[in-house]
Amino acid sequence: MSTSAIKAVVKWGKKTIEIELIPSNGVIALKSELEDKTGVPQERMKLMPKSKGLWKGLLKDDFNLESIDYSKFESNSSSGGGGSPIQILLMGSASKLIAPKVKTVFLEDLPAEEAAKVAAEPSGLVNLGNTCYMNSVVQCLRAVPVLRDGLTRYATATAIDTTRNPSHRLFLSNLRDVYTNLDRTATPVTPSHLVVSTKMAFPQFAQTGPGGQPMQQDAEEFFSGLLTIAAGETTQKQIIKPAFQWTGVDNLIDALFGIEMEETLTCDELEGATDATTHDTTNTNTTTDVMDLDDTKHTTNTLEPPVTRHDLHRKLVCNIQGGSDASSQVNVTHIMEGISLSLNGKVQKRSDVLGRDAIWTRRQTMARLPSVLVVQFGRFYWKETPDSQDHTGVKCKVM
C-alpha cells in the first residue's frame, strides 16, 4: 500500500487549490480535505480527471486510488522527478457562504428613527386640504438646524411664562413637534395640530370656499407670518446666542435671516439743477456771506440732498418675470439679475425743494448678509382692476 504524497492541483471555478494526495487514504479522505478548503459538501462533489492516466468519468467513493500509476507524476517523497502535478476538476457549490466583513443592514430592518436618518428622501407632510403652502415652508425651514434648536429652547424657556400670546406659543410648539416627528420616521407625517394652530394664529388661513373646502393660500404670506411670530417670541438671550450675533438684534429670526439694507433715494426731477447765481469774492467793495476756501467764485447747489436710511429685511426678492408688471420686457436669466431688479426702482415721494410729490430713484445695497439668505422668486404682479366691484386689484400669475 502506497503512503507517498502526490502533488495535485484542483481547479474549482476560478480558484486553483493545491493539495497533497495520499492514495492510501482513499477517496473519502480526499473529499474531506477538499470540503475543508472549499466548503463544498462531499455529497455535492463531482471530481473529474484533467490529467491522463487517472480514473474515467466521475470519481466514485469506492475507487481504489492506489491502482493508478503515479510514476510519471511528481512525488513529494522522491528526490526528483520530471513529471507534473495531477490535474483534477472539482464541480459543486459551497453550502456555507463566507460572512462579509461588514454586516449588511437593510433599511426595512432599522428602527423608524434610524431609518429616517438614512432614507434617500426626507419624510413628507400629508396635505390636509390645500395646506401645501404650509407644508412647503415647513420643509424649507427644516434645513435650518439653528432655528429648530431655537424652537426647542423656546419651549423650555417659556414653559411657565403666562405673558406670551397663547396662540403664538401653541403655533411654535406645534411647529417644533412636527420637526421632531419628521426626524423619527421615514413615512409621511400628518400635521393636524399645526394646521389647527396655524388657523388660530392666522385667521385668514381659515377661509373656506363656497363648498366649505379650505381655500388656497400663499406660501410667502405664511412664511412672513411665521417669521413675524417667531421674531416676537424668540427674544430670550439663550435662544439668540447659538445664532450669528449682530449688534442690535434682539430675536432669533433677525439673527438668522436679517439682511441689513442701505437704501438711497435721489430726486430725479432736480438732478443736475444748480443755481446760476455766482458770487465774486475778489471785489472788496461787495459784502458777501458766502465763504469760498478754494476758488474766487462759488456756485450755489440747490440739488435735493439724497436720503439714505438703513433697514433690516428678512428676504430678497427675485423678479423672475423681469419687472413689476406684465408689460416688462426684461429677460431674467440669472438669479442675480432678478434680485438687482427688485433692489432698484422708482418711487413717489415729497420733495422739500419743489414743495410737492416728485419721482425719486431708489437704490438698495446689502450692507451685511445673514447666516441664512432667503430668496423669494416673485411669480405674481399686481394688476389694477378699475372696472371691478371693489376696484382694489388682483394678483395675477406672471408665468
Image (cartoon, rainbow, N blue to C red):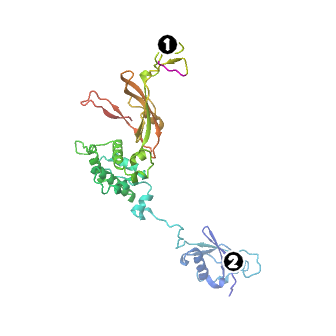
Residue 70 x %, y % = 71, 80
Q: Would residue 142 be seen by someone viewing this image from the given angle?
A: no
Q: Magenta stretch containing residue 184, yes or no?
A: no
Q: 257 or 324: which is nearer to us?
A: 257
Q: Earlier in the sequence, mark 2 or mark 1?
A: 2
Q: 12 or 60: which is nearer to us?
A: 12
Residue 153 x %, y % = 37, 55
Q: Would residue 251 be seen by someone viewing this image from the given angle?
A: yes
Mark 1 residue type: Thr
Residue 348 x %, y % = 37, 27
What residue sits right under mark 2 in the picture? 7
* Rendered view: 260 above or below 42: above
For residue 286, the mark is 1
Mark 2 residue type: Lys
Per the picture, the main secondary structure of the magenta-coloured stretch is loop
| Label 2: element kind | strand
The crowd level at tag 2 (other Cα within 10 Å; few <14, some 14-19, many 20+) is some
Q: 390 or 83: which is nearer to us?
A: 390
* Rendered view: 343 above or below 96: above
Q: Residue at position x 28%, y 47% from top? A: 201
In what quadrant of the picture does the C terminus appear? top left
Query: Disc 2 vs disc 1: Cβ atoms closer than 8 Å?
Result: no
Q: Residue at position x 43%, y 58% from top? A: 117
In the picture, measured across the screen, residue 14 lies left or right of residue 237, that is right
Q: Residue at position x 38%, y 47% from top? A: 251
Residue, far bottom: 1
CA–CA distance in space, label 2 to label 1 = 129 Å
Q: 323 or 27: which is nearer to us?
A: 323
Residue, far front: 285
Question: Bounds of the magenta span?
Answer: 289-293
* Rendered view: 97 above or below 296: below
